[in-house]
Amino acid sequence: MLLAARLPWLDVRKGGRTHRSSRKAAVMALDGAHRHELRLLAASRPAFPVLLTLGRFTGPIRRLPGVGWLVSDPSIARRILTDPDHFTILGEGIVGHLWAQVLGDWVDDMFDGAGHRALRTQTRDLFTQDRAASLVARAAGPRLRRCTAELVAGGAVDVADLARVVVGRIVADLLGLKHGMQQAGCAESDDDAAYRELFNLGEQLAALAARSTASTSIPEHAIASARAIVARMTGGVAAAWREASADTMLGRCRELGLGLRETEGLATLLMVAGTQTTASAMARTVALLHDTAEQHRLRAQPQRIDDAVREGLRVTTPVPVIGRSVSADLEIAGQRLRAGQRVLMLAYTTNNAPGGFDLDHANLQDNRQPWFGAGRHYCLGSLVGRAELSALLDALLAAGRPWRIVERRYARRVLIPTYVRLRIALA
């Protein structure tokens, strides 16, 4: 395949000699895992494999007419992401422009102005490592223990659905909406339904961005539909905003002096950004551990969960492409970039250049976790995302035996590549 990475020959030794059959099996497992990832990318948006392939051959930065500047070098990408004087998230073709049309012009300040800095400063302590671990244990612990019990009892678990429910629970708890889900008009057929619907509404909103590769100018009828979805998602925000504890995002928004309209908008953004990417990484990491057979090494060395989480985030890179708009002319890597042009950082290409999923991959200093972004827009919830993925792997390891995939289906025409279904059972 065009996008297939060059796989390193694995030196599996037995009695001082290279065990060729084991080496061949390991390479085949990695190749199979890579094929599934490619199919998943193509199912989400057919252009993804082509775009990400181009990044391997165009050099560190190259302009593609009709698309923009393509960046596949991690150091250049980091320079762009950490340069607010020359790059913005608000220009045409970039996500900030899209959200401003749906939520209002106040988004500009919250995305790239003084309001953005104030909000991050005001809420940073909600996202420490200890807080993240406590949040995940409280909001998702019982549901993950139920998953372990179902597997041990011989049942099958849809990890893709489980991930959607888990991230929905965690975002609702973080916002302070835990007791306001019913007011939001969510279904109540079981205790997972409200959180599943919260995720699905976020996915519908994200689909707007999936249709905006060339332009983020949205027709009026689409804006009206998006605002209707936002109204459903935030139906419980008003009551929670008035009563929420200062240990929640809604409580902090109130203390910061944000009005209800802005608070509902920020809640919407968190419901989308805090669920779609993490759920994708969770399901895909479980698949990668199975497809590469690395789950057996992880079972033997459960203390390496941090390595598995890092590798899962690196290989999956849930946001394959990160966009910025040039706000002021500059020269970078010998190229002249001009105001108004678009820059697309091919994060998936960059992150996967070192090879496939492997617990022994070192923490690459050149990359420095670009799957969470960098600079002023570095993901504030990165520690929560890691904790969610760790908790899921803990729950699967607690089942006591390796898992096998009994059914998988790729999600089609979605912004964030993911599995729509990934059922596993114990081997």
Image (cartoon, rainbow, N blue to C red):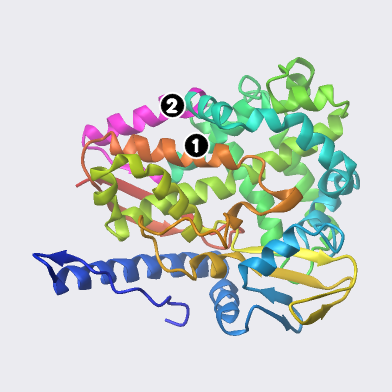
Q: Which residue is mark 2?
A: 141
Q: Is residue 416 above or below residue 274?
A: below
Q: Earlier in the sequence, mark 2 or mark 1?
A: 2
Question: Residue 332 location in percent, x, y?
Answer: 78, 75
Residue 333, by quadrant, is bottom right
| Residue at which label 1 appears | 387
Residue for point 91% across, 48% down: 105
Percent coordinates x, y for residue 232 in the rendering? 71, 36
> What residue type is disc 2 on?
Gly
The location of residue 8, given as percent across then percent down, is 34, 73
Q: Is residue 153 magenta?
A: yes
Q: Is residue 359 left or right of residue 341?
A: left
Q: Is residue 89 above or below residue 272?
A: below
**Residue at x 66% of width, y 62% of height:** 210
The overriding secondary structure of the stretch rendered in magenta is: helix
Magenta stretch: give its range.
138-159
* Residue 70: quadrant of the picture: bottom right
